[in-house]
Amino acid sequence: MRSFLCIAIFAAALPAFGQAAAGAATISLVTDGVERSYRLYVPAGYGSERLPLVLAFHGAGGSPEGLAELTGFDALADRERFAVAYPAGVFADSSSARSWNASAGDGVNDVQLARDVIADVGARLAVDAERIYVTGFAAGARLASRLACELADVLAAAAPVAGLQYPDGCVPAAPISIVAFHGKADAVHRYARIEGSAPEWRTSFETAAEGWRKALECPAGAMEGGFAREPSLVVRVYPPCAGGADFMLYVSETDGHVWPAGAVERIATFFRSRKRRPRD
C-alpha cells in the first residue's frame, strides 16, 4: 500500500502526459541519424492552453542560451504567451562549427531538424499549428530564410535578422509573411554586395529582398515610413502579396551586424496577427 501511495504521489507531481513544465529545458533528439538538441522555453504559468511556437536560430558560433539572452524572447514569451524553441547548430561553415546548413547543399539536414523540433515540441505541449513562426540572427537568419521557402506550408511567418537570404529558385508551397531587419553598416552580410564577401553570404540584402518580393508576388513600390524617436530607421511595407502574405523590411542607416534594439517587440507584433495561410 505504501509503495502504491508513493507512486501515486510521485505521478501527481509530474506534468501531465504531453505537457511540458514552464521554464527552460534542454532537450535532445535524433534528426537524420544525428543527435541534436534544442532549448525549449515554456511561458510561466502554462497549463494546457494551445500556444504559438517560435523557432529561433542563433548566429554562427552562437548558442541557444546566447540567443535567448541577446533577444529577450523568454520574457516576451511570458508576456505574450508563446513557446520558444532554440535549436543548437552543428554545421561547419567558413567561420564556425556551430552554424547552419542554410543552402541546399549536402551535409547536416537542418530543414529536417526544424520539422523534428516542431513535432517534438508538439508532443510535449499543445501547439497551435496555425501559428508556428521562425526567426534567426545572422547565419540563423539565413536558415530562417530557407525554412520560409521549404516549410511555407507549415509556418505562418518568418523574421530573419541581419541575414535575409533568397534561396535559389525558391517557390513557396503556400503564402508566407516575412518581416526582415538589416543595417546598412553591416560588414558581414552586406546591404549591397561587394567583392570579398564571405561565400555563405551569396547575395546582398538588396538582392535577397527583391528575390523574395518576386517570389511572394508582391507589387513593386513599397511605402516607406520613419520613426521620430529612431530617425535612422526606415520601414518599407509592400502592398499585399499573393494569397494575403505580407512583406515588410526594417532598414537602419547606422546599424552593423547586430540584433537591433526593439526588433523582438516588432517581431512579436508582426507574428501576433498572422496565421498560416492555406495553399493556393
Image (spheres, grey):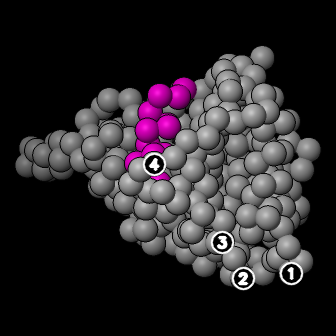
Q: CA distance from mark 3 to mark 1?
A: 14 Å
Q: Earlier in the sequence, mark 2 or mark 1?
A: 2
Q: Position of residue 8 (x, y in %)?
A: 16, 42
Q: Position of residue 266 (x, y in %)?
A: 45, 46
Q: Which residues are magenta?
A: 263-275
The answer to whether one can see residue 111 in this image is no
Q: Earlier in the sequence, mark 3 or mark 1?
A: 3
Q: CA distance from mark 2 to mark 1?
A: 14 Å
Q: Amino acid at mark 2?
A: Ser
Task: From the viewer's perspective, tell me whether residue 242 is left or right of residue 247.
Answer: right
Say which residue appears at 76% left-offset and 76% top-offset. Answer: 93
* Marks 4 and 3, how far apart at CA: 21 Å
- Pointer 4 or 1: first along the chain: 1
Question: In the image, is residue 271 part of the stretch drawn in magenta?
Answer: yes
| Label 1 element class | loop
Q: Is residue 137 above or below residue 16?
A: below
- For the residues marked 2 and 4, what is the alpha-carbon distance in whole angstroms? 35 Å
Position in image of residue 41 (x %, y %): 38, 53
Q: Secondary structure at mark 3?
A: loop
Mark 3 or 2 closer to N-term? 2
Q: Please state which amino acid type lies under the numbered disc 1.
A: Gly
| Residue 99 sits above or below residue 180 on the image | below
Mark sitting earlier along the chain (2/4): 2
Which badge, 4 or 3, comes first in the chain's sequence?
A: 3
**What label sits on residue 227 in the rendered view?**
4
What residue would you read off at disc 3? Answer: 186
Q: Nearer the viewer, mark 2 or mark 1?
A: 1
User: Few, some or many C-alpha atoms within 10 Å of disc 4 (few <14, some 14-19, many ≥20)?
Assistant: few
